[in-house]
Amino acid sequence: MSENWRDMDMANPTEEHSMLREMVRNFVRDKVEPQALENDREERFNIELFREMGSMGLLGLTVPTEYGGAGMDATSVAIVNEELSYSDPGLCLAFLAHDQLFVNNLVHSGTDAQKDRILPKVCSGEWVGCLGMSEPDYGTDVLGMQTNAAIRDNGSWLINGRKMWITNGIIDEDGTPADVVWLYARTGTDDRGRAEITTFLVERGMEGFSAGQKITDKLGMRASTTAELVFEDCVVPAENVVGKPGESMIHLMRNLEHERVGLAAMSLGIARRCLHDMNSYATEREAFGKQIRDFGQIQRHIGESWAEYRAMRAYIYDTARQIELSEAGHRLDSDGVKLYATTTAKNIADRAIQVMGGYGYVGEYVVERMWRDAKLLEIGGGTLESHQKNITKDLKRDSEAIDS
Ligand SMILES: Cc1cc2nc3c(=O)[nH]c(=O)nc-3n(C[C@H](O)[C@H](O)[C@H](O)COP(=O)(O)OP(=O)(O)OC[C@H]3O[C@@H](n4cnc5c(N)ncnc54)[C@H](O)[C@@H]3O)c2cc1C
């Protein structure tokens, strides 16, 4: 038996991971926490703070160092998401859309020329990226997408369609579109009638690309912008096609696995914050001459939250450890961990509100925002129902996973 196996901390497996966590935790305390409440109220994306994350090396966390990134792994991404979401899940969602949906996709699927030209800009924060998959009429049913692209005689492509719910789709109050979109479009139909999907890098200023409505009045994640994107005879040059036309399903599925672990890690940050705040409050608050933590019903809220928080932490970091960013093959656990962690975080936030009574119900005490933000994680990046469907499908194919 190897000697040090008991020393392994899955959430901080190496010195580099611990240092990253400490750096982000300090940044969150000093810069993120002071602005979180106001940007939630104002439904405003703090692009200045986002760009500061570029100078800290966080916007290209998984990008090889030769392109200006930090060359780290899925565990590092989970650490950053957890720490940011402890204070501001909305800002973290903007980070996730850029880092995990755009940048990481480009690293693993882009051509050398695309990477040379675009990665330095997105790693520094000069450019903000996003991913356009969902549409007004097609979300879970992704292969039903209607946005389509046709090749022209000169090799460029003409794209038509609309994308909906796009995080970072616009980046400011003037409705300026994202600098660059990782766009999925239908370029053919297979013999089962399903879309053959191709990825395009659509850049701001390209003919026919514009932002539609900013989606306001969201329940949560209000510190990130959500918008519709419009493609009307949008012309995209051949060099902005990613991979072979019609073959994007492979990287689409691979990146969804990474995204789902990232969203689960956001849930962990929410859960930890809510547990922290309800625990402190239960000591500070007295009723009937006692600290409220002496009441059995409060103990149930805290005790159950602790156990569930610890279970999510173990499952998330165990899954992140196994994710090899350049490969697919972890759908069972990336679905499993998101299914468990998102609802658990929402439940823990709910208990925190309950423990904190009327105070828990107002913005200044943070946990109501956490509860609102947690709800999105049950929908975005795959709904709970889609995870249940995928897990059941995968366990039919691979029932040995249960006993392994
Ligand atoms: C704030 C926010 C940010 C987002 N950011 C992005 C982004 O950056 N990029 C992007 O592309 N998308 C983004 N999305 C879209 C998100 O991924 C979709 O909302 C999600 O995939 C669900 O799709 P839908 O809303 O169309 O719901 P639908 O797919 O229409 O689902 C409606 C209901 O039907 C259920 N359902 C559907 N199919 C089945 C089935 N086969 N079995 C059982 N139940 C089923 C669903 O689970 C759900 O309960 C974002 C959404 C929000 C709200």
Image: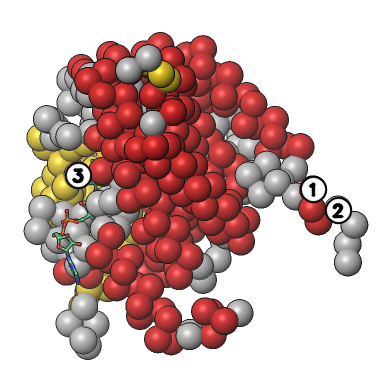
> How many numbered discs, if any?
3
* Closer mark to the observer between disc 3 and disc 1: 1
**Residue hosting label 2:** 4
Question: Counting residues from the N terminus, which is met first, the one under dot 3 or under dot 1?
Answer: 1
Gap in angstroms between the C-alphas marked 3 and 1: 43 Å
CB-based contact (under 8 Å), mark 3 and mark 1: no
User: Could you say where residue 259 lies in the image, as x and y percent from the top left?
Assistant: 42, 52
Where residue 7 is drawn, which disc sits there?
A: 1
Task: Answer with left or right where residue 206 lies relative to residue 34.
Answer: left
Residue type beneath disc 3: Trp
What kind of element bears circle 2? Answer: loop
* Closer mark to the observer between disc 2 and disc 3: 2
Residue type beneath disc 2: Asn
Q: Which residue in the rendered view is the most extreme toward the front?
A: 289
**Residue hosting label 3:** 165
Q: 352 or 374, which lies in front? A: 352
Question: Which residue appears at 68% of the width and 42% of the height?
Answer: 12
User: Could you say where residue 65 lies in the image, as x and y percent from the top left?
Assistant: 67, 39
Residue type beneath disc 1: Asp
CB-based contact (under 8 Å), mark 2 and mark 3: no
Q: 173 or 372, which lies in front? A: 372
